[in-house]
Image (cartoon, rainbow, N blue to C red):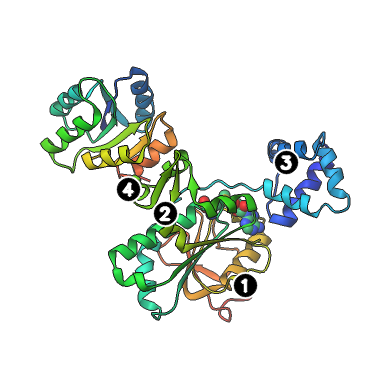
Amino acid sequence: MSNATFQFIAGIVKQRSGGVLGPDQAYMLDTRLAPLLKRENLASLDALALKLRGPASDKLAQEVAELLTTNESHFFRDGKPFDHLKELLPALHKARAPGLPIRIWSAACSTGQEAYSIAILIADAQDLDPSMKARRFEIIGTDLTRAVLDRAKEGIFTQFEVQRGLPVRALMKHFKQIEGRWQASERLRGFTRFEQANLLQDVARFGRFDVVFCRNVLIYFDLPTKARVLNGIAAQMAPDGALYLGAAETALGITDRVEPLLGQRAVYRPVAARMARSA
Amino acid sequence: MSMDCLVVDDSGVVRKVARRILEKHGFSVREAADGALALQAVEQAMPRLVLLDRNMPVMDGIEFLKNLRARYGSSEPTVVMCTTEAAQERILEGLEAGADEYVMKPFDEAILVDKLTMVGVLQA
Ligand SMILES: C[S@@+](CC[C@H](N)C(=O)[O-])C[C@H]1O[C@@H](n2cnc3c(N)ncnc32)[C@H](O)[C@@H]1O
């Protein structure tokens, strides 16, 4: 692959997903795009670049960007945010008027482990406090990549995937075995909804959220993109809502629309727009 | 002080793999080739953790577990069952007999460490 080809494809990725590809990741193009080259009958990445420069290549470019996202995920990843949410759920239930739903957003949900981990916490909280059963809980999972969303909707995970982070008792209680794989119960799936959405674009249509998980996606973005995405999320949050970031991510020094919750790592709350120095 | 782990499996190869991973994470490891030998080992000293195979000659994992819990109560040691078989009823049977967690063989180091953290044997 020529350097020009790498730069060109990296440019497509940056523009469409926000992901920054460094030269050390050039190998990813070979492995991830190989099936696409084959399907399109293209001899090389250079040939792909040529096709992408041609007319009517919008769909192909989107595919390239989606294929170059990293979709790694597991249940109850990093532990801490879920410990925090477990405490927060009953508090939100008390704070909200009875008829109001509690809405949780798994932004960049990948194959759905994060959304289903949240669903498990909700189901268990309801079992502990039956008054929470009358409350509607909505988990909206969104991602750029269609292929992972299809998997998230099914809620079917391999033996390997359910081993990662999921306590065996939660597996027994909330999943059903089908042909060696495990499907989230109807109850869990009933809390969730999955939709395609690009965090770089307008996300206001998803409405107001009490809780947002935006984890392990900002790491792929450059600083201005991180700020833009975080500000967009902050604008969708209830004033007493919580935002969880990944263990390797921070909003500090990036935006003042959210601030860390005292004594907590990777838990943020929104700062009222008029209070924030415009970022 | 290192934590004591008893690895119970009739396969020497599996015990060796488990030993390598556990020692790397600061455990001192004892081995037993079946449930009866494992009960003897527990009698000598109570381990912090038992990694337990299911199918073994002489005394299998489930029977060992029932004996163990009947004699020493359910609070210690922590028992993680290790099987190649993942049928839901089988897993439930192990939990009912007193297992705390489950991992699938062959061992994946990251998963084993993750599970040991889940049950509080290792720190996050
Ligand atoms: C590593 S996964 C994180 C999954 C989950 N949040 C977790 O922490 O385990 C990152 C996900 O971000 C998605 N993604 C990347 N860029 C995106 C964008 N601009 N808009 C929405 N999703 C994006 C990818 O498709 C991928 O599924």
Q: Is residue A273 above or below residue A248?
A: below
- Label 4 and label 2 in one chain: yes
> How far is mark 3 from mark 4, CA to CA?
44 Å
Q: Nearer the viewer, residue A85 or A160?
A: A160
Give the residue at mark 1: A204
Disc 3, disc 4: CB below 8 Å?
A: no
- Label 3 and label 4 in one chain: yes
* Mark earlier in primary sequence (4, 2): 4
Give the residue at mark 3: A23
- List the single residue furthest toward the top: B12
> How far is mark 1 from mark 2, CA to CA?
30 Å
Q: Chain of mark 3?
A: A
Which dot, 2 or 3, sits closer to the camera?
Answer: 2
* Mark earlier in primary sequence (1, 2): 2
Q: Nearer the viewer, residue A223 or B94?
A: B94
Q: Is residue A64 left or right of residue A152?
A: right
Q: Is residue B93 left or right of residue A36?
A: left
- Look at the numbered disc 2 and give the secondary structure of its residue: loop
> How far is mark 2 from mark 3, CA to CA?
43 Å
- Label 4 and label 1 in one chain: yes
